[in-house]
Image (cartoon, helix red, strand yellow):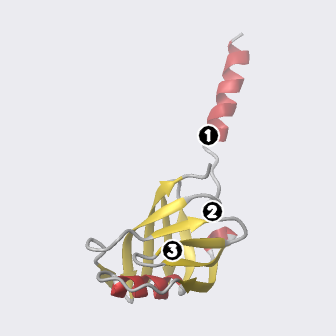
């Protein structure tokens, strides 16, 4: 009797410990910190910057003022390819410098680390670091 109960419990625990090695389509992330060219960028006075991951390597979100879109291919082993970014072209009173720094940094990232609650994109020999926190999970 104990074996019948113990095996399903162990199976559930084993499966619960399995996570994907890359972020899932349908997840949305909030930029928590940004380092560009080794300098920390102050995000406190800007609109939130987000990254939503869709199917087929498509990403997009709010860059603080505008909406951006592009492609990021998350590869196994922590490598990535980021390319083909575009954005709407509205002008905002605050945050345009931060937005420009973010979009520039996003196009230069080449690696990532990922956990259930945090996504870190890195480039330029770790001189560029975009740290995102999970905002919404895939439905």
The residue drawn where x is 35% and y is 82% is 92
Regarding residue 64, the answer to whether it shows in the image is: yes
Q: Which residue is mark 3?
A: 121
Give the class, few, some or many, for how many residues have Cα within 10 Å of label 2's Cα (few <14, many ≥20).
some
Regarding residue 125, the answer to whether it shows in the image is: no
Quadrant occupied by the N terminus: top right
Q: Which residue is mark 2?
A: 22
Contact, mark 2 vs mark 3 (Cβ under 8 Å) = no
Q: Secondary structure at mark 3?
A: strand
The residue drawn where x is 64% and y is 47% is 18
The residue drawn where x is 62% and y is 34% is 13
Near-viewer residue (137 or 92) = 92
Q: Quadrant of residue 16?
A: top right
The residue drawn where x is 60% and y is 43% is 17
Q: Secondary structure at mark 2?
A: loop
* Residue 58 in the figure: left or right of residue 116: right
Q: Earlier in the sequence, mark 2 or mark 1?
A: 1
Give the class, few, some or many, for how many residues have Cα within 10 Å of label 3's Cα (few <14, many ≥20).
many
* Residue 138 in the figure: left or right of residue 99: right
Q: Earlier in the sequence, mark 3 or mark 1?
A: 1
Q: Which residue is mark 1?
A: 16
Q: Secondary structure at mark 1?
A: helix
Position of residue 107 measured from the top left corner of the image (x, y, whole percent)? 54, 86
Look at the picture and state if 54 lies above or below 64.
above
Look at the picture and state if 97 lies above or below 70.
below
Look at the picture and state if 75 lies above or below 13.
below
């Amino acid at each position: 009797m104990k074996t019948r109960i113990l095996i399903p419990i162990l199976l559930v625990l084993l499966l619960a410990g399995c996570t994907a090695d890359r972020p899932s389509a349908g997840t949305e992330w909030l930029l928590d910190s940004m380092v560009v060219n080794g300098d920390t960028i102050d995000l406190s006075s800007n609109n939130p910057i987000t990254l939503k991951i869709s199917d087929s390597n498509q990403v997009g979100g709010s860059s603080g003022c505008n909406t951006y879109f592009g492609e990021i291919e998350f590869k196994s082993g922590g490598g990535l390819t980021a390319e083909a970014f575009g954005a709407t072209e509205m002008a905002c009173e605050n945050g345009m410098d931060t937005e420009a720094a973010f979009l520039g940094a996003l196009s230069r990232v080449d690696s990532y680390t990922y956990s259930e609650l945090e996504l870190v994109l890195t480039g330029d020999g770790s001189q560029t670091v975009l740290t995102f926190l999970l905002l919404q999970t895939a439905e």
